[in-house]
Amino acid sequence: MKKYTRRHYNKKLLALGLSAFMGIGLISTGFAAWVMSKDEQVESNGNVNVAIMKDSSINIKLWALNSDGSIKKEGDNNVELSKDDDNKYILTDTFNFDADITDNTGRLRYEGDATGGEDLTVTIKGVIEETGIPYALKAELVLPESIQNAVTQGYLKLSTATEELLADDDGIDIAEDGSFTVVIQLAWGDKFQGVNPSVYYDTNYGEASTTGTPLGKDVDNTKMQEEMTAFWYCLTGEDAASNKHMSQEYSFNGQFTIKLIATALDTDTNN
């Protein structure tokens, strides 16, 4: 995927770009050609895997999903997700920290193809096969170190929905037929006032839902470049103070792990 900047009305425009799968190229001006998108050629290799932790009496299957979130079928049968060498399911869904695919204007914007764009949500669908015993299912999210650093530094955060899911003592809702859906969401952090950087740097406080604190439209290009470079280094795990040239390519190789923990419930009432 090409990474480039364009001139419009003789002003340098910054294109937002990072890739969960691919190397990230930065041109000699230091502006990032940020094009994070799903690559259809690596459909079976997302950046999220699922580890199943369960009692031996419980059997869980996870389903492969189509791009619209529906379960893939082969005839009348659901298609099960593939597993890696560590017996973890590999989601075809993935986290993409890009501009919205419809954001094609402004100094920070989307410059990828029609398959990319921001995606901060992954969905898991599966089934717990009939066991004849009561059980509970919970989720735990393990962030790669670079993403945890981005959360700590305020670039990203867990969404409220995800925080509630992971803290919910009642566990994940399971239908009568044993099917379940788990939705994990990330969100943009306070450094971008909770919105995509491509929105933040092109919006002033008068246009925002909050007032009193100017958004990034009031930040000059130099400061914006410094902040986005720091964010980029944070996600790639590189040191912003290193002597590496911005024209080199780096890649974000972090892997998100979602642990699904299924536990048989104790039905002994003689406590």
Image (cartoon, rainbow, N blue to C red):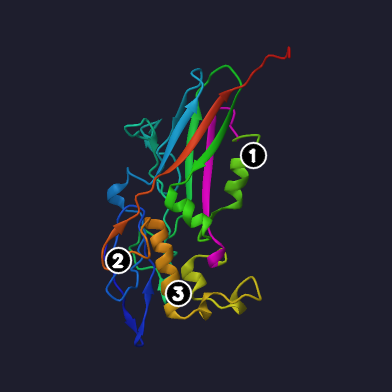
Task: Name the residue located 62 percent from the left edge and 75 percent from the top edge.
Answer: 213
Task: Name the residue located 43 percent from the left edge and 79 percent from the top edge.
Answer: 221
In the image shown, does 77 or 4 lie closer to the viewer?
4
The answer to whether residue 41 is magenta is: no
Image spot of residue 141 (x, y percent): 51, 42
Task: Name the residue located 32 percent from the left edge and 82 percent from the top edge.
Answer: 7
Q: CA distance from mark 3 to mark 2?
A: 21 Å
The answer to whether residue 187 is magenta is: yes
Quarter of the image with the N terminus is bottom left
Of the two numbered discs 3 and 2 in the rendering, the one whose residue sits closer to the viewer: 2
Task: Name the residue located 40 percent from the left edge and 41 percent from the top edge.
Answer: 91
Dots 1, 2 in contact, CB < 8 A: no
Quarter of the image with the C terminus is top right
Helix, strand or loop for disc 3 = helix
Q: Which residue is mark 2?
A: 243
Image spot of residue 209 (x, y percent): 63, 70
Q: Which mark is residue 224?
A: 3
Residue 120 appears in view: no
Q: Which mark is residue 168?
A: 1
Q: CA distance from mark 1 to mark 2?
A: 45 Å
Q: Say which amino acid is labelled 2.
A: Asn
Write down the region rendered in magenta: 173-192
Q: Say which amino acid is labelled 1.
A: Asp
In the image shown, does 164 or 27 lie closer to the viewer?
27
Helix, strand or loop for disc 1 = loop
Mark 3 and mark 1 lie on one chain; the one further toward the N terminus is 1
Residue 164 appears in view: yes
Q: Quadrant of residue 111?
A: bottom left
